[in-house]
Image (tube, rainbow, N blue to C red):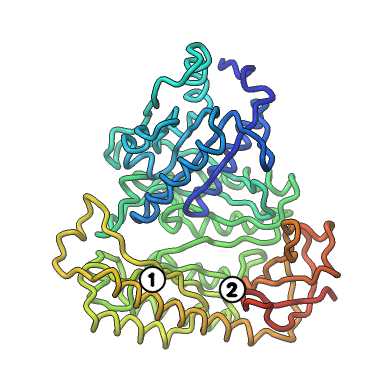
């Protein structure tokens, strides 16, 4: 039995970098520490414990992680500092070399947060000063990362984030995620249904399914993702489910058809494309071509004409000549999608992409990113504009002080309420609104409650 009495009344500060999966895990860390008597540090308060959950998808992400770790240490100079996440797994020595870091937890070890923290905390309290960081991580090979840390939490948000899967078996040439999170693994459908029922009992109305490659669900248990979706659709109390991201080769026509007629799965999809050039997709070792991707988009739109479709696109990867980028741009311009998540390729040590000879200059990556972002803005504005004047059901979220209350329609249009209509009791409520004009920066539609 671990003695957690030393943590009673302590204050903790948290920071998450990266994806929704990281946010879900950080929220669960916060819940775990709260059960030990640790309170969240308020704005301007000095924390006794800082936890930073890191990302390592690009070298820019690595840089941001180092910046945030140092900033948290400056803001909370006497705090016990824990760093976990992908950057901690891939570069533990870099993290541990930062003065002020006490504990570095890798992918396998973060599930033992309480045990690892208690042990190291006692050492520091006994000596009265930091003795350098303790590094706890898996051996470094993807196959050695075995554990699955469950997570279903909302933190300070309205929506719950349910972790249904972790790791990846795909090993795309540009990506380090399998090395950071291990191979694909998952809990049982039964356990995920139980967690979702708990979220409903706590008042949750919407749940977002998160993971690294969630369409690959079932590698551990022999189950299938479509079976998980069917089971979750039956959970009373949860009125909305969203699927955070699905690889196109794992987005079956059967799943699309089910979502089109389901009780609670929303007409909202996020599908990683990465490139609209078949030649580049082959260099990336992606498992589909653009014809398959176009078919999935067309099938979604055939069954759900108003569905929101977000797409990941990488620009400037090795081998992407100007002609191949033009192919990508032209393909995306004609594709009936709503929004592009554009990010420049970043060279990652140890990846197979480094063997590809053609290198795109940084300024050219920036130019290509700007072109695709402008295309994305155009598509999103047109999608939003088609819905002006319509009625819609919106799940509202509590607004930060001084900001407009906002929420999302079933098909993920962001909606803002004027201050005169905003009410604290609207938080986590599904309300009928009439959609109006764009807000001042064209990131949402203004609305009035009917």
Residue 408, given in percent of the width and then of the height, sits at 67, 68
Q: Is residue 232 left or right of residue 314?
A: right
What's the mark number on residue 313?
1
Identify the residue at image location x=44%, y=31%: 101
Q: Quadrant of residue 221?
A: top left
**Circle 2 or circle 1, nearest the eye:** 1
Left or right of residue 153, residue 59 in this image: left
Residue at 55% from the left image edge and 27% from the top image edge: 78
Q: Earlier in the sequence, mark 2 or mark 1?
A: 2
- Compute the Cα span from label 2 to label 1: 25 Å
Q: Where is residue 53 drawn, in percent x and y? A: 48, 43
Q: Is residue 296 above or below residue 160?
A: below
Q: Quadrant of residue 34?
A: top right
Q: Classify mark 1: helix, strand or loop.
A: strand
Give the number of the disc on residue 421: none
Disc 2 element: helix
Q: Decide if residue 192 is on the left or right side of residue 165.
A: right
Label 2: few (<14), some (14–19) or many (≥20) C-alpha neighbours in 10 Å: many
Residue 323 is left or right of residue 415, and the answer is: left
Q: Quadrant of the C terminus?
A: bottom right
Q: Name the one closer to the observer, 253 or 381.
A: 381
Q: At which x and y percent is residue 287?
A: 30, 66
Please tell me which residue lies in front, 115 or 6. 6
Q: Are marks 2 and 1 in contact (CB under 8 Å)?
A: no
User: Mark 2 highlights which residue?
Assistant: 260
Which quadrant of the figure contains the N terminus?
A: top right
């Amino acid at each position: 039995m671990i003695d957690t009495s030393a943590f009673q009344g302590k204050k903790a500060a948290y920071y998450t970098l990266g994806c929704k999966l990281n946010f879900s895990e950080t929220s669960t860390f916060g819940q775990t520490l709260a059960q030990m008597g640790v309170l969240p540090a308020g704005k301007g308060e000095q924390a006794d414990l800082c936890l930073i959950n890191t990302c390592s998808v690009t070298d820019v992400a690595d840089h941001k992680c180092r910046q945030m770790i140092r900033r948290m240490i400056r803001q909370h100079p006497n705090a016990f500092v824990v760093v976990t996440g992908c950057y901690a797994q891939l570069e533990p020595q870099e993290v541990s070399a930062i003065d002020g870091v006490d504990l570095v937890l890798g992918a396998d070890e973060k599930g033992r947060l309480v045990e690892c923290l208690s042990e190291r905390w006692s050492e520091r309290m006994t000596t009265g000063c930091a003795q350098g960081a303790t590094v706890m991580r898996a051996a470094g090979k993807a196959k050695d990362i075995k554990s699955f840390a469950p997570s279903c939490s909302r933190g300070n948000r309205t929506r719950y984030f349910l972790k249904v899967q972790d790791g990846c078996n795909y090993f795309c040439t540009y990506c380090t995620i399998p090395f950071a999170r291990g191979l694909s693994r998952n809990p049982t459908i039964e356990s995920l249904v139980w967690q979702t029922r708990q979220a409903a009992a706590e008042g949750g109305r919407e749940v977002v399914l998160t993971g690294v490659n969630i369409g690959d669900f079932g590698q551990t248990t022999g189950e299938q993702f479509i079976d998980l979706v069917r089971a979750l659709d039956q959970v009373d109390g949860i009125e909305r489910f969203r699927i955070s991201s699905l690889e196109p080769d794992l987005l079956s026509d059967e799943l699309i058809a089910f979502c089109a007629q389901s009780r609670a799965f929303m007409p909202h999809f996020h599908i990683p494309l990465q490139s609209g050039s078949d030649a580049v997709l082959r260099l990336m070792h992606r498992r589909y071509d653009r014809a398959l991707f176009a078919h999935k988009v067309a099938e979604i739109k055939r069954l759900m004409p108003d569905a929101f479709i977000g797409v990941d696109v990488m620009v400037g990867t090795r081998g992407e000549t100007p002609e191949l980028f033009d192919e990508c741009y032209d393909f995306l311009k004609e594709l009936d999608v709503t929004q592009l998540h554009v990010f420049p390729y970043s060279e990652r040590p140890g990846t197979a992409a480094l063997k590809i000879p053609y290198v795109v200059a940084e300024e050219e990556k920036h130019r290509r990113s700007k072109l695709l972002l402008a295309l994305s803005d155009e598509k999103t504005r047109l999608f939003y504009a088609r819905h002006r004047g319509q009625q819609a059901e919106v799940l509202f979220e509590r607004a930060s002080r001084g900001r407009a209350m906002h929420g999302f329609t079933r098909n993920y249009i962001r909606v803002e309420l004027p201050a005169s209509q905003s009410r604290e009791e609207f938080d986590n409520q599904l309300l009928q609104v009439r959609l109006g004009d764009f807000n001042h920066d064209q990131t949402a539609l203004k609305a009035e409650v009917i």
